[in-house]
Image: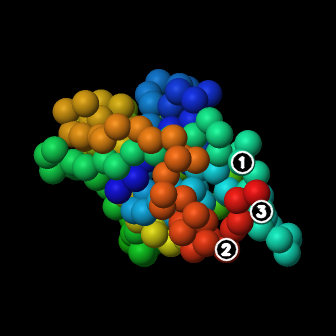
Amino acid sequence: MVAAQHAARHGLWRARFASPTKAFRILYIAEDLATCLAEAIIRDRFEGKAFRELAQSDIADWGVCAVSATRPLRLLTLRGDACFKLGISTDIVGAKRHDEARALSQALYETTDLDGIVYHSRLRKKTCMAIYDRAVTPGLSAQAVVQLERLAALVPALKTLRTTLI
């Protein structure tokens, strides 16, 4: 699994499962580098565009690292038809707006001892995890953060996303 880190973000950015009250931080982890790039950097910027070019400046402040679990994590899965089976809105994992997802995450954080949520990327349908701050230190091990622009796997991952680095 791969985690992205942006120098200016510090874990409180307004992403899908972030706390609406800033009561906790989330570490987002993706199954692979391409999904990490799509979820953290590219997002919806190429909608309606024929050319998919990412400027060097768009990645200059980003780093990535490999992450692994050091113990079994207690995760709520929202993959596949889980939202339907749980009777919760499918917008929690599928919508561009994150209000419902943030509210659910806040409730889970406050009322359970879950370590986080596992879900499919809205953009790539690959596995992602949102790990609560309380589970990061006792539950995860990370390799050193590598500047994204120095990563040999960057160009092949961007190619997977049909994106060119300029």
Residue 6 x %, y %: 57, 36
Residue nearest the observer in this picture, 166 or 129:
166
SS at badge 2: loop
Circle 1: residue type:
Gln
Spatial CA distance of label 2 from label 3 is 9 Å
Residue at left offset 45%, top offset 31%: 25
Residue 111: x and y in percent read 32, 36
Give the structural element (helix, strand or loop) at label 3: strand
Circle number at residue 162: 2
Q: Is residue 71 above or below residue 45?
A: above
Residue 143: which quarter of the image? top left
Residue corresponding to mark 3: 53
Is label 2 in contact with label 3 (beta carbons under 8 Å)? no
Residue occupying the point 71% across, 48% down = 56
Specify whether residue 87 is in view.
no
Amino acid carrying label 2: it is Arg
User: Along the horizontal axis of the image, is 5 left or right of 47?
Assistant: left
Q: CA distance from mark 1 to mark 2?
A: 16 Å
Q: Quadrant of residue 99?
A: top right
Q: Secondary structure at mark 1?
A: helix
Q: Which mark is residue 56?
A: 1
- Disc 1 crowd rating (10 Å Cα; few below 14, some 14-19, many 20+) is few
24 relative to 8 in the view: left or right? left
Estimate the x, y position of residue 63 in percent, counting from the top left. 51, 41
Residue 65 lies in quadrant: top left
- The quadrant of the picture occupied by the N terminus is bottom left
